[in-house]
Image: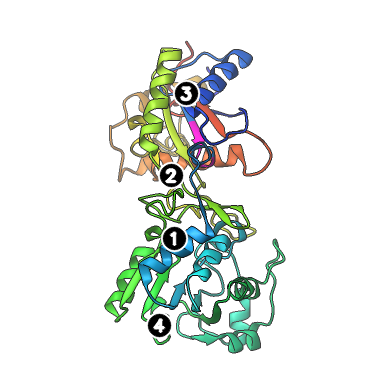
Amino acid sequence: MRTVGTTSRGVRCPVIREGDDLVKIVTDAILACGEEQGITFQDRDIVAVTEAVVARSQGNYATTEAIAKDCAAKFGTDTVGLTFPILSRNRIAICLKGIAKAFQKAYILMSYPSDEVGNHLFDEDLLDEKGVDPWRDVLTEEQYRSLFGHVKHPFTGVDYVEYYGELFRSQGCEVEFIFANDVRAILPYTKNVLCCDIHSRQRSKRRLLAAGAEKVLLLSDIMTAPVDGSGYNEQFGLLGSNKATEDSVKLFPRDCQHFVDTLAGALRKATGKQIEAMIYGDGAFKDPVGKIWELADPVVSPAYTAGLEGQPNELKLKYLADNDFATLSGDELTAAIKDSISHKDADLKGQMASQGTTPRRLTDLIGSLCDLTSGSGDKGTPIIFIQGYFDNFAKEAK
């Protein structure tokens, strides 16, 4: 029996700068990894590259001035409402700084007790203690402070209401906070709204327009084209951006499908194998302690080769062992399970033997594996090399 199934390796490469030939750099790094580790490349191996280095190689950046200019041109008003910005210095603070430059007055609607990705303004148990219904009660900043005080995030030490308020005021923009979980709570204050939520943005826009909003834009509508030579992302705009400097952000990469297809071709030429390629961003996992859902990007993978389409089609081994083959053990049990795998249906959806086998898209699962492998700090492994992901218990050693 083969003792090794799936392996995930973080692969190092030089620090990427604008204009670098990233396809060549990644290909060379994978070949060097193979030589160093004595790896035999196989069809359906996976090479994944973090979105950050793809965007860096493209020079896909935008300044706060460019963001301000785009917002001013698209709204044409001096007052705006912002709804449901997440609580993040890295993800949205610099975007908010640019937005603040474009307006004289901003109303900011904050969801509570947490944002959509699980960053908490305060402990949710305080809602019960204070008798507050987060689905019905709309709070002013004065009411919010009276009820919950000045709470700092336990990990970052930041009071985000204070932080965002100071950020807007520093740009000459008057700011007023409202706290509610119904996006329509912004409309008594202004009919011009920029939805700052990520995964619920289309529903927010639809509900606002139905309730009488005059102009509703999404973060994905800002920086969709160059502004004075800036970077841009025609599909996601500011979504997926990260802080670069105090006055600029790195945008989500563009032309992603072209990159992965070109990379797959280079790997095939170098190895003779059909290696799949993808770009990954945030994984889609949730921290049970910090309660943060990691996915602050609009998608886990903005592009991937065709072999990564779909979702797993797997049998649950322990179900087979405890039910279909409960009387077997040892070699007989192993042989029976391998035979079931070898003859499983092409689509197991709805079958009891597949329950609990993670019914999610392959790219979301693989992207999460990549994000956990590479980390987001100083590991220096922006390339992930995965082998055996599509293996199963029935595959014999060669």
**Of the residues shown, which amino acid type is indicated by label 3?**
Thr
Residue located beneath label 2 in the image: 358
> Mark 2 and mark 1: span between their CA atoms?
24 Å
> Mark 1 and mark 4: span between their CA atoms?
21 Å
Residue located beneath label 1 in the image: 198
Q: Does residue 49 show up magenta in the picture?
A: yes
| Residue lying at 37% horizontally and 77% vertically, measured from the top left | 192
| Residue lying at 49% horizontally and 67% vertically, measured from the top left | 99
Snapshot quadrant of residue 351: top left
> Along the line of sight, which residue is nearer the eye, 321 or 232?
232
Disc 2 and disc 4 in contact, CB within 8 angstroms: no
Residue located beneath label 4 in the image: 190
- Along the polypeptide, which appears first: circle 2 or circle 4? 4
Rendering coords of residue 266 (x, y %): 42, 20
Residue that protrudes farthest toward the top in the picture: 398
> Mark 1 and mark 3: span between their CA atoms?
46 Å
Rendering coords of residue 86 (x, y %): 53, 65
